[in-house]
Amino acid sequence: MAEAAFEREAPDGEQSPASAPAIAIASIIVSMALIAIGNGLMFAYIPVRLGAEGFSPTWAGLIVTGLSAGGLAGCILTGPLVRRVGHARGFMVLSALVALSNAAVGAGAYPLLWIAARTLYGLAICGLFVVAQSWLNDVIGNAIRGRVMAIFYVAYVAGLGIGYYTLAFVDIASAEAALIGIAFTALSILPVGMTRLRQPPPPQAASVAIRHAWRISPVGVAGMLAVGGLSMSITGFAPIHATAKGYSQQDVALLLSAMPLGTLLLQIPFGWISDRIDRRYVLVAASVLVVVSGWLAVGFDGRALAILIVIYVFWDGASESIYSLASAHASDRAGKNDLVALSSSLLFAWSFSGFVVPGIVTVLTAFYGTQSFMYVAIAIAAAYAGFVIWRIVQAKPVPAEETGSFSPMSAQAPLPVDLAFPTEEEPAR
């Protein structure tokens, strides 16, 4: 029944370009959810293992920075890879790189090796998102696009949460976490390897045009620059700081696994409101909530874990909401022919900030301690709120009837980039 709702047969018996069987679409979503479980575990494991081995938190910060640098490279290199081998083989190649990264981490606590390994992981995971999301966008029709992409993001965030919590059951002194990460990565290849989902045609390179994107939506581009730093600061440095403060392995796992709940709890009401009023007002509200939550995190730092979990849930959820709201706002202001270049530029802005800000936090951590990320996140959110308020004063709002519908997104799952050749309805510029 579900399959019939998605599938229409073209005259030659092939799947229609506008639709695909539900089970085939699910193969991509399931693959990314399986990858997320292994990724969440490795994200939590590395700072805890380094802390247990007595390494300075600066090393963990450098590893986060390396991961972000890899993501920036992934934005640039994924297009040529998929042009050469196609979406399915590209997905498998990138999954193999994730497994190789996990294997390097499992070789032992060698920080320099781990920096290289996580840089490779950053490249691979960014590439996987570009491949998976562009593939889905090519084979699903507009009527179900929002629902399918919402399921995609929720499945990935849920997988991260499961992976984070898995840390509580892992022997931190062994290679167990790396082996589990490799196992889930290997499992993720199976649905894609066996899928009958039609592959898009060989892609053209997605152009990055930051200046053009800025002319379309300064608030959208600035939002990506803000949330790239926010996401990598909060998610990347929270386990580093919690470990340095003396929280147990189980406590760190519980804190990280609870944080994705904020994304699921806050994005729907924020999105519902933003579909009815100027999204910029909601962006200001989300940014202010990040600032308030950040100050509460500072004030209650080191207190009871239950209090910190509630604070971090709202802190992380509010910052993740900026990602989806800024993306939706930018899309509202773009023409149909601008969407490919716009999404590529937003992804590049997000990745660039995700590389630069962790580097700054790492330097500050060496001098001022692991709590530095809190003040950096507060400063970024406050600056962005101020910028959006200024834009509200300067620019006219988009009428509610001209806005698109909001779709939940996560800054842990980068914006989709349409790698496929433009269709006849969407000519190249």
Image: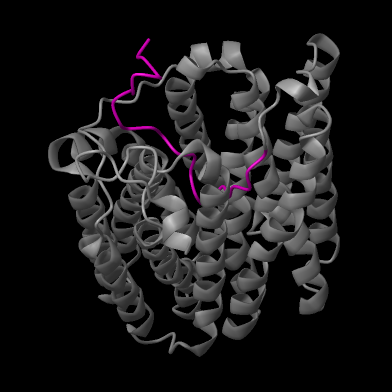
Q: Position of residue 379 (x, y in %)?
A: 74, 38
Q: How many marks?
A: 0
Rendered residue at 32%/32% (across/down): 419
Q: Quadrant of the C terminus?
A: top left
Residue span colored magenta: 406-429
Q: Residue at x 63, y 54 (%)?
A: 234
Dominant secondary structure, magenta: loop
* Closer-to-camera residue (322/271): 271
Classify 48 as above or below 353.
below
Magenta-drawn stretch contains 414: yes
- Residue at 24 percent across and 38 percent down: it is 11
Judged from this view, the residue extending furthest toward the left is 84
Decide which of 108, 104 is in the foreground and name it: 104
Q: How is the image coloured?
A: one colour
For residue 252, above or below residue 14? below
Instruction: Locate residue 300: give its quadrant.
Output: bottom right
Specify the farthest residue to the front. 11
- Residue 317 lies, in percent from the top left, at 71, 54
Q: Is residue 29 magenta?
A: no
Q: Residue at x 45, y 76 (%)?
A: 49
For residue 81, what is the image quadrant? Answer: top left
Q: Is residue 84 above or below residue 54?
A: above
The front one of 65 and 7 is: 7
| Residue 3 relative to residue 161: left or right | left
Image spot of residue 357 (x, y percent): 55, 40
Any part of residue 114 in sight: yes
Q: Position of residue 344 (x, y in %)?
A: 43, 28
**Relative side of 37 to 314, left or right:** left
Q: Nearer the viewer, residue 30 or 123?
A: 30
Residue 105 visible to an observer of this rendering = no
